[in-house]
Amino acid sequence: MKRAWLFMMAVLLVAATGCSQKVARCTAPEDNPAHHYLRGMEALEAGKLELAMEKFDRAVYCDDEFSAAYGGKAMVAALRAKGLSDPRYRDVEARQAREFLERADDQIDNDNDRFEFLLASLRVATALKGQGWLESAEQFYAKALKVPVDEKLLPYYQGKEAASYFMGLAYLEAYTFRKAEDKFRETLDSRKMGKWNAPADQAWKKTSKILRALGGITVGDVGRKIAVKDSVSRGDLTALLVDELKVEQLFAGRIPAKSQLAAMKAEFTPADVLTHPFRDEVLTTMKWKVRGLEPKFDQTTKAYLFKPDDSVTRGEMAFILEDVLIKLTGNEKLATAFFGQDRSPFPDVKATSPYYNAVLNMTSRGIMEGDLSGEFRVAEPVDGAEAILAIRMLQQKINIY
C-alpha cells in the first residue's frame, strides 16, 4: 500500500509540474515567433497586408504572449481601415486595431516591448486619423524616446531613430511639412549607416521638394493633399488647374462677350465623374477644352469616360500645361515652336514624340525640369510636388506675357 501511495503521489507531482509548464507549439528552427514577426513587419512595409497578418497570426500561435506581434496585427488592421471607404467596415477594422493594441499593452514584458508598442501606437494613430490623432502620435513619440531600449535586441526597428522617422511620416500625413522635414533630418543625423537612413533620405527629399513647390504661393486644402501624392491623377490635375491656378477666371477674362461666356459649358458629363469629388473641376476643364484632358473612349463600356483616377505622366503634364499657356497667352505659335528639330536634348524624348514640342516649351521656360540623369522621365507619373511646382512656375510665366 505504501508503494502504491508513493507512486500515486509521484504521478500527481509530474502531472502538476507538466501543467505549470507552457508547451511549445512551434518547434522547428525557423518556426518561431520572432522570425514570423520579422517577416510580418517586412511584409507590412511592402504593403502586403494579408501576408503580414498571416505572419503575425503565426507568431501569436507560437507564443500568445508575444506583445510585438499584437502590435503588428494592430497596424495591419489600421491600414486596412485606412483603405476602406465604407464607414461601417472601416469602424470594424479600426475597433480591431485598438483591441490588438490593448492586447499588445497587456503583454509588455520589458523596455523593448514598450518601445515597439509605442511605435505601433504611433503608426496606428497615423493610419486611423480621427480627432486629436496628431497630438496622440506626438505623445507616443515622446514616450518612445524616453524608453531605455537595448538596440541589439530590436530585431526589426534596430534603433531608436525609427521613432523619428515614423513621426516624420505622421507630420507628412498631417501636411505639417516643416516638422516632417525636421524629423527626417533627425533620423539621418542619428546614425550614419542605420536601417532608416535610406527611407528617411528619400522622405526628406520628397518633403523638401514639397516645401519648394509650396513656397511663395497660397495653396488650399486640395493642393496640400495632392502635394504628398506619389502620382497625380487626371482628376487631381483638374483640381489644381481650377482651384489653384484659377483657370476659369483666367480663361474667362479673355472672352470679351458675356453672352458667349454664359453659353459655354461642357458638352456632356462623363458617367465616371457623376459622383466624383472633382466633378465640377472636370467639367470646367472640359468646357474650356483643355487639350490632354478630354474624355477618352472606353472599349468596355463603349462610352466616352474621363478616367479621373488614371495617373498623369510627365509627358502628358507638359502637353496639358502647354495648351493652358497657349490659351492664356493667345500665342498659337507655341504649338509648333520646336517642330522640325532633329536632335532632342532629352534621350527619352525623341524629336518625333507627340510630347516633344510640349516638353521643350515647358523646360525652356523653366515650368518643368528634366532629371539629373539628363532624361525628362516622359513616361513616369508626375508626383504632387512636381505638379504644384509646375503650376507655380506657370503662374509666374503668365504674369510675364
Image: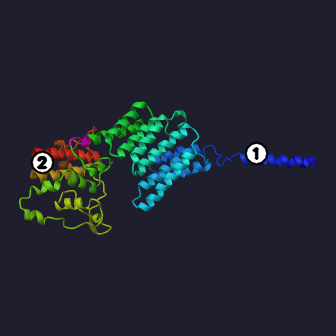
Image coordinates for residue 5, horizontal then vertical, percent: 89, 48
Placement of 134 over or under 251, stated as above or below: above
Give, as a three-letter code, the residue at label 1.
Answer: Thr
**Horizontal relation, residue 184 to residue 31: left or right:** left
Sort mark 1 into few (<14), some (14-19) or many (20+) by Cα contacts within 10 Å.
Answer: few
Residue where numbered disc 2 is placed: 337
Report the magenta residues as a range.
212-216
Residue 185, by quadrant, is top left
Query: Which residue: 42% across, 31% down?
Result: 190
- Are the two marked residues, 2 and 1, in contact with CB atoms closer than 8 angstroms? no
Question: Quick check: 276 left or right of 338?
Answer: right
Identify the residue at horizontal 13%, vertical 56% (top origin).
251
- The residue singled out by tag 1 in the image is 17
Q: Residue 34 at what x, y percent from top left?
A: 57, 43
- Name the residue at 44% across, 62% down: 88
Q: Residues within 10 Å of mark 2 (few under 14, many from 20)?
A: few
Circle 2: residue type: Ala
Q: Is residue 260 above or below residue 174?
A: below
- Which residue is drawn at the image coordinates 64% and 45% (left, top)? 28
SS under mark 1: helix
Q: Position of residue 372 (x, y in %)?
A: 27, 37
Q: Is residue 84 magenta?
A: no
Whether residue 216 sits left or right of residue 161 in the image: it is left
Of 185 and 45, the residue lying toward us: 185
Looking at the image, the residue that sits furthest to the left is: 256
Determine if residue 159 is in view: no
